[in-house]
Image: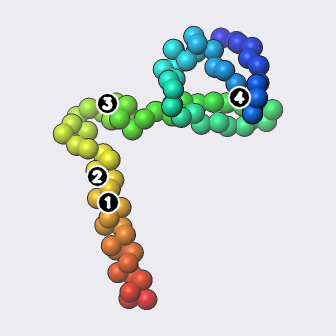
Amino acid sequence: MVELVTVISKGRVIIPSRLRKELNIVKGAKLLVIREGNAIKMIPVPKLSKMASVDKELFEGRNPSEEIKEIRKEWNKEFEERIRIA
């Protein structure tokens, strides 16, 4: 698929609606912007909640966000203990 778009104020580009629908790019979606030589790639970044459905058995009954918070708490506690020892 090839589309011609125009850069408007502040470097904004409108992604054609057909592409947005096909790639499920909605308001607030994040895009990774990569420069490759003279080309620019925009890659949709999937939400963690969408990624969780990739392996439903692994994430069933789990809350990744809460687990990450708990891991961070442990890391912070461990870091603070190491600072006190040093």
3D distance between C-alphas at marks 3 and 1? 22 Å
Q: Residues within 10 Å of mark 1 (few under 14, many from 20)?
A: few
3D distance between C-alphas at marks 1 and 2? 6 Å
Residue 28 coordinates in the image, percent (x, y): 51, 31
Q: Is 65 above or below relative to 73?
A: above
Q: Nearer the viewer, mark 1 or mark 4?
A: 4
Question: From the viewer's perspective, is 61 left or right of 33?
Answer: left
Identified by mark 3, the residue type is Ser
Question: From the viewer's perspective, is 5 left or right of 77?
Answer: right
The quarter of the displayed image where residue 4 is located: top right
Q: Nearer the viewer, residue 6 or 34?
A: 6
Identified by mark 1, the residue type is Ile
Question: Of helix, strand and loop, which one carries label 4?
Answer: loop
Identified by mark 4, the residue type is Arg
Q: In the rendered structure, which disc, 4 or 2, sits on the residue that comes first in sequence?
A: 4
Judging by the rendered image, the residue that carries numbered circle 4 is 12
